[in-house]
Image (cartoon, rainbow, N blue to C red):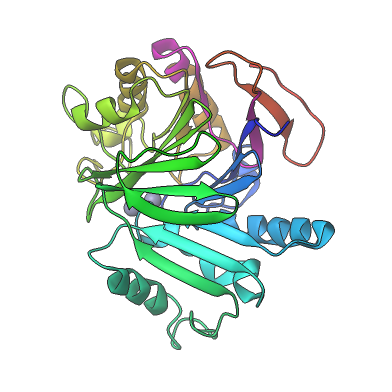
Amino acid sequence: MKENLEVIFWGVRGSYPAPGKDTLRYGGNTSCIEIRAGEESIIFDAGTGIIALGREIAKRAAQHGKAMKVSLFLSHLHHDHIQGFPFFVPAFIPSADIRIFGPASSDEVLVQVLENNQSPHIFPVSLNEMAATKTIRAIREREQVVVMAEDAEIREAGSRVSEDAALIRVHHSYAHPGGVNIYKLEWHGKSIIYATDTEGYEGIDRRLGTFAHGADLLIHDAQYTQEHYLGNRPGASSTQGYGHSTIEMACEMAKEAGVGKLVLFHHDPGYNDESIAKNEVHAQRIFNNTFAAREGMHLLLRDDQKEGAWQFEKERADSIVERM
Ligand SMILES: [Zn+2]
Ligand SMILES: [Zn+2]
């Protein structure tokens, strides 16, 4: 059990939350993914999905009588990737230790943006007033973060690490306004790429293709249909240059990088369940091993399984089990 790698989707929507009867199947919360690598728990992004995750982390810690240690990696600082943080329960608990990493020119700039997100005009509790111990660090492409035994430290990229450590590598992309960090998590020979908020290039994004090469799982921005992207969707203008990919761009990247499985992520908030399901089927015709991210979905890679042998485990809180 210790060497299983589990991915849990807490928020899969892009841009802004999309609650309502038409988004029940795929979910309406903005970006947040939790990866459990053995004993370590690593979070990507703090969209509104992190609110329910925070409650879950606090519950788990109370059950096990353990202090909370959280490693949170922000892809970038756009609102839909940080808006859940002011409601993240562990941040209010004095014994909790929260390490936040993200793209910025300096640690101070990253702190400043997160402080602004909780300035008195916007939110009643400042970042500083949140009781947990917080370490906030800017990370760059030349660095990597080693998470082991509940500690997280920044090292030079390329330095050797123990197999038991979860290693997070950084690819800084300019394919999104203001730039975005794309992360690769490696653990016991398995790898997951978290590539949200990125727009494909003509002939695919070569740097990302190299970074993602051979990953077991690629979680990739797939906000738009091609029709929408090109401005042919009735009532919608073109979204070219907004920094998000089409379904086709995500599939082409999966093919080019030779990944095991592709998850379409950062769904457009204007797309209902029916249209995402349609996009999922369309994507599977281009890259067979694809599915659309669903809030509450668990993916499990068991240690005794071969590369790419991912399984669905548990759908939401109930006991529906699907196999891939
Ligand atoms: Zn976004
Ligand atoms: Zn963004």
The spot of residue 242 in percent (x, y) is 25, 47
Left or right of residue 305, residue 256 in this image: left
User: Relative to residue 265, is residue 218 depicted above or below?
Assistant: above
The spot of residue 305 in percent (x, y) is 63, 15
Residue at the far left: name it: 202
In the rendered image, residue 122 lying in the magenta stretch gets the answer no
Left or right of residue 75, residue 22 in this image: right
Q: For the magenta stretch, what is the residue range?
A: 283-302
Which residue is located at x 36 percent, y 35 percent?
224
Left or right of residue 46, residue 184 in this image: left
User: Relative to residue 167, is residue 1 depicted above or below?
Assistant: above
Left or right of residue 120, residue 253 in this image: left
The spot of residue 271 in percent (x, y) is 48, 40
Residue 117: tell me if it is visible: yes
> Looking at this view, is 272 or 315 the one in front?
315
The spot of residue 258 in percent (x, y) is 36, 15
Which residue is located at x 22 percent, y 52 percent?
177
Q: Image quarter for residue 50? A: bottom right
In the rendered image, residue 285 lying in the magenta stretch gets the answer yes
Residue 32: tell me if it is visible: no
Which residue is located at x 26 percent, y 32 percent?
208
